[in-house]
Image: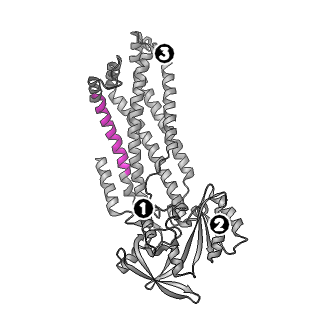
């Protein structure tokens, strides 16, 4: 029932196009539908209960079948005894596996969601700023060319590219106009597939590069002018002083929804070389720079270089832009909360696995004492305990990882409206997840060694 509720809730969310943040008439606001979070919550609980049922069935039916088929790890002399012991402990082991899966799913879902949030927050800020470091307000092509050559030689700069910005009339609508080199713009800024409609970022930019007079327009412009692919579009471009404009013909090649430094309403993207041939004046030049290290340090170096050369030029970096964004929840710094959550997730995973093994051993101390009295050695007892540990950790780890990944995906989908462009995929913090696995395995190994070193024969005297 819980899984059915989760599926229905997630289907409703996807079909209704639910967005957490919306902007009626340009004023961004937040509208939280808390029922949207019922899907991930029910999915988490339902998956855990389904895990208990499935694992219980596997212990009861799967182990005997594995023995009959003589599968690997079930062909040694102790295998029948170990398998019978595991099957007999089915209720206890199912609960232990569920606890471990719960801890692992929490760690995985928390880590993936937080990593995706942090990465997309950076992408959101880069969309606003344009690149790691942006130099804007340059009024002449000669000055822009001179600055570009100097900025490219900075040791902290990985790449630098020029973009033109101006204005053009589409009918009676004045829109921002951007001139770019589609082949090289991706060297300095992130261009997500979500920025473009009907095609990936690479396909849209290739279409623009292959058509020298091509133009990418917004959805609103396509609707207003009933444009179709390869239609001719006449723009009025500035041609000189006195606000004089001249007509220039462009060819519609695609739809753009977001673009670095562009406003949220309608704008145009064209080839920079063709734009300069049609409107050599009335343009402002912007230099986008990708940093090799800290963007703030590169921005300081760029400011010192640009200041004496060109007055009125503004230098900004993505770190400052990330702090200043107030139009969405990505302005919230979650680093402290993230550290707390991830630390708790590690402690939870290690503690859950250790507690599961401790409870299992406590329940079976009498059995181990009897085995010892019958002549079982420490390696024999270790075979039982390591088998239980392997079943609990491997089963719980695999189930927890799968459930945690699905929950993280659902949460990212719920909160996709927070970002100007939704994430293209999940960001997986592999280092953290491997650290969780290593710490959990180390904790279990230490705990098992401690339990094996504790004598069990004293239990017989207590019962006698």
Q: Earlier in the sequence, mark 3 or mark 1?
A: 1
- Proximity of marks 3 and 2: CB atoms separated by less than 8 Å: no
Q: Which residue is denoted by mark 3 in the rendering? A: 455
Magenta span: chief secondary structure:
helix
Q: Is residue 44 located in the magenta-colored stretch of the structure? A: yes
- Residue at (38%, 44%) from the top-left corner? 403
Horizontal and vertical percent for residue 318? 59, 62
* Measured Cα–Cα span from mark 2 to mark 1: 48 Å
Horizontal and vertical percent for residue 148? 63, 67
Quadrant that contains the C terminus: top left
* Measured Cα–Cα span from mark 3 to mark 2: 76 Å
- Proximity of marks 3 and 1: CB atoms separated by less than 8 Å: no
Which disc, if any, is residue 97? none
Which disc, if any, is residue 149? 2
Which disc, if any, is residue 32? 1
SS of the residue under disc 2: helix
- Foreground tag (3 vs 2): 2
Query: Which stretch is magenta?
Result: 40-60
Q: Earlier in the sequence, mark 3 or mark 2?
A: 2
- Proximity of marks 2 and 1: CB atoms separated by less than 8 Å: no
């Amino acid at each position: 029932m819980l899984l059915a509720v989760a599926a229905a809730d997630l289907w409703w969310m996807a079909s209704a196009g639910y967005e957490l943040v919306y902007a009626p008439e340009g004023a961004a606001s937040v509208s939280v539908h808390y029922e949207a979070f019922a899907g991930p919550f029910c999915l988490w609980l339902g998956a855990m209960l389904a895990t208990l049922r499935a694992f219980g069935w596997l212990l009861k039916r799967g182990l005997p079948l594995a023995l009959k088929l003589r599968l690997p790890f079930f062909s040694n002399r102790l295998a029948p005894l170990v398998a019978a012991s595991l099957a007999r402990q089915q209720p206890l082991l199912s609960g232990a596996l569920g606890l471990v899966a719960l801890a692992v799913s929490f760690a995985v879902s928390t880590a993936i969601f937080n990593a995706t949030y942090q990465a997309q927050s950076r992408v959101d800020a880069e969309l606003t700023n344009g690149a790691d470091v942006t130099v804007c307000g340059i009024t002449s092509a000669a000055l822009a060319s001179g600055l570009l050559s100097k900025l490219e030689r900075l040791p902290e700069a990985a790449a630098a590219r020029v973009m033109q910005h101006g204005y053009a009339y589409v009918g009676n609508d004045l829109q921002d106009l951007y001139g770019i080199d589609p082949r090289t713009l991706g060297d300095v800024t992130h261009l997500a597939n979500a920025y473009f409609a009907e095609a990936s970022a690479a396909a849209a930019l290739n279409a623009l590069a292959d058509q020298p007079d091509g133009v990418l327009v917004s959805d609103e412009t396509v609707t207003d002018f009933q444009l179709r692919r390869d239609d001719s579009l006449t723009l009025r471009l500035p041609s000189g002083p006195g606000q004089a404009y001249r007509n220039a013909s462009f060819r519609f090649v695609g739809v753009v929804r977001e673009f670095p430094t562009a406003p949220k309403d309608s704008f145009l993207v064209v080839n920079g070389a063709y734009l300069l041939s049609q409107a050599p004046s009335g343009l402002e030049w912007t230099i986008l720079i990708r940093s090799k290290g800290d963007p703030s340090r590169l921005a300081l170096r760029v400011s010192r270089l640009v200041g004496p050369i060109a007055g009125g030029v503004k230098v900004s970096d993505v770190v400052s832009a990330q702090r200043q964004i107030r139009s969405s929840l990505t302005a919230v710094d979650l680093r402290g909360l993230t550290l707390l959550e991830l630390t708790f997730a590690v402690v939870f995973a290690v503690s859950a696995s250790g507690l599961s093994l401790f409870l299992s051993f406590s329940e079976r101390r009498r059995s181990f004492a009897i085995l010892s009295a019958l002549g079982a050695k420490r390696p024999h007892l270790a075979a039982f305990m390591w088998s239980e540990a392997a079943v609990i950790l491997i089963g719980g780890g695999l189930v927890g990882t799968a459930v945690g990944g699905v929950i993280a995906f659902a949460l990212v989908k719920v909160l996709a409206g927070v970002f100007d462009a939704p994430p293209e995929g999940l960001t997986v913090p592999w280092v953290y997840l491997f650290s969780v696995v290593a710490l959990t395995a180390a904790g279990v190994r230490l705990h098992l060694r401690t339990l094996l070193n504790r004598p069990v024969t004293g239990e017989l005297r207590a019962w006698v």
